[in-house]
Image (cartoon, helix red, strand yellow):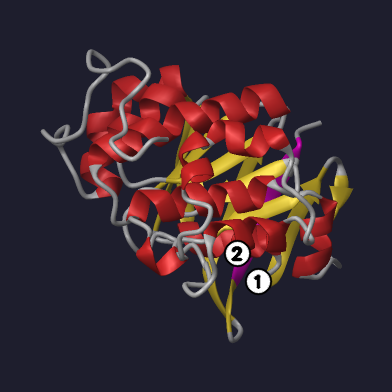
């Protein structure tokens, strides 16, 4: 049984379905990408998993148990941590205060900051003064403080330089492998994502257009990009598999 099972999900807002008949799964230790053009329904799917939008039909199961009746806070306690696309950080807090708040005023587990060592040098800096990459590091570290079984990351690369995005993926790969959690990520840099993820789901028009392992999807990526993702070629600014096998980051990821 998968860590996360979404079966024939229909969900939306104010009784209007935005996603319909969506099915996907995430295994423990697996990094899964949810791809699609703007408006495809990716964020709504993530919000439905976290309990933040209305589910009209279908089933969501975590660790083989239905979470249909659980409020968002209960789902978080059950092991789901959601990093939204706006990161939802408090700009007036410092890095240390943000981490302590996430950890219930306790010191964070040592392993959390081992994934983002640059945060150790930014403890007294306010969130408003952080770069985009530093804020994303902090948002991920805050989520990890709860030691989630499922980490959901929406639009991790939003507003970040491609080289910075390229550096986050190996960190997520390590988190999935070393912590045994599943990671479900919405990503716009398709070709970068395909270097690191295990499986891919492609959404279009609120439904699932294609799913498969990375090896199965890679030969189809130009076809899928043209049909569903709004791009046809590899962006020149995004490193390919021949560049920086473990990625680089000018902000210390």
Measured as percent of width and height from the top left, residue 213 is found at: 50, 23
Residue placed under numbered mark 1 in the picture: 52
- Considering every residue shown, the one lying at the far bottom of the view is 14
Main secondary-structure element of the magenta-colored stretch: strand
Q: Element type at marker 1?
A: loop
Q: Toward the viewer: 154 or 34? A: 154
Whether residue 155 is visible, yes or no, is no
Q: Quadrant of residue 243?
A: top left
Foreground residue, 50 or 229?
50
From what the image shows, is residue 74 above or below residue 107? below
Q: Residue at image x 56%, y 33%?
A: 115
- Camera-nearest residue between 72 and 221: 72
Q: Which residue is mark 2?
A: 47
Asked where in the image residue 181 lies, by quadrant, the reply is top right
Residue appearing at x 78%, y 49% in the figure: 79
**Given contact means CB atoms under 8 Å apart, are the residues at marks 2 and 1 in contact?**
yes
Q: Over which residues does the magenta segment extend?
A: 3-11
**Which badge, 2 or 1, is on the more N-terminal residue?**
2
The quarter of the image holding the N terminus is top right
* Location of residue 248 in the rendering, given as x and y in whole percent from the top left corner: 31, 27
Q: Count neighbours of disc 1 (C-alpha within 10 A) and say few if under 14, some if 14 to 19, many if 20 or more.
A: some
Residue at x 53%, y 53% (from the top left corner): 123
Q: Position of residue 49 (x, y in %)?
A: 67, 58
Between the residue at mark 2 and the residue at mark 1, the CA separation in whole angstroms equals 5 Å
| Residue lying at 17% horizontally and 32% vertically, measured from the top left | 234
Front one among 110 and 236: 110
Q: Is residue 97 left or right of residue 208?
A: right
User: Is residue 50 shown above or below 192?
Assistant: below
């Amino acid at each position: 049984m998968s860590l996360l099972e979404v079966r024939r999900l229909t969900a939306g807002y104010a009784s209007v379905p935005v996603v319909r008949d969506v099915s996907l799964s995430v295994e423990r230790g697996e990094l899964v990408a949810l791809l699609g053009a703007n408006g495809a329904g990716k964020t709504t799917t993530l919000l439905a998993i976290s309990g933040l939008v209305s589910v009209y039909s279908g089933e969501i199961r975590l660790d083989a148990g239905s979470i249909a009746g659980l409020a968002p806070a209960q789902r978080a306690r059950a092991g789901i941590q959601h990093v939204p696309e706006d990161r939802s950080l408090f700009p007036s807090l410092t890095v240390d205060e943000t981490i302590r708040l996430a950890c219930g005023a306790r010191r964070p587990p040592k392993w959390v900051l081992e994934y983002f060592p640059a945060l150790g040098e930014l403890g007294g800096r306010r969130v408003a003064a952080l770069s985009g990459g530093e804020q994303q590091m902090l948002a991920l570290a805050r989520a990890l403080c709860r030691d989630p079984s499922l980490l959901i990351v929406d639009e991790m690369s939003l507003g970040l330089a491609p080289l910075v995005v390229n550096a986050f993926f190996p960190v997520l790969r390590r988190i999935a492998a070393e912590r045994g959690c599943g990671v479900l990520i919405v990503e716009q840099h398709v070709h970068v994502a395909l270097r690191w993820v295990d499986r891919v789901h492609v959404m279009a028009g609120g439904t699932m257009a294609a799913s498969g392992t990375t090896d199965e999807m890679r030969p189809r990526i130009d076809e899928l990009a043209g049909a569903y993702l709004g791009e046809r070629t590899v962006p020149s600014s995004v490193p390919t598999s021949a560049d920086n096998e473990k990625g680089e980051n000018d902000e210390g990821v």
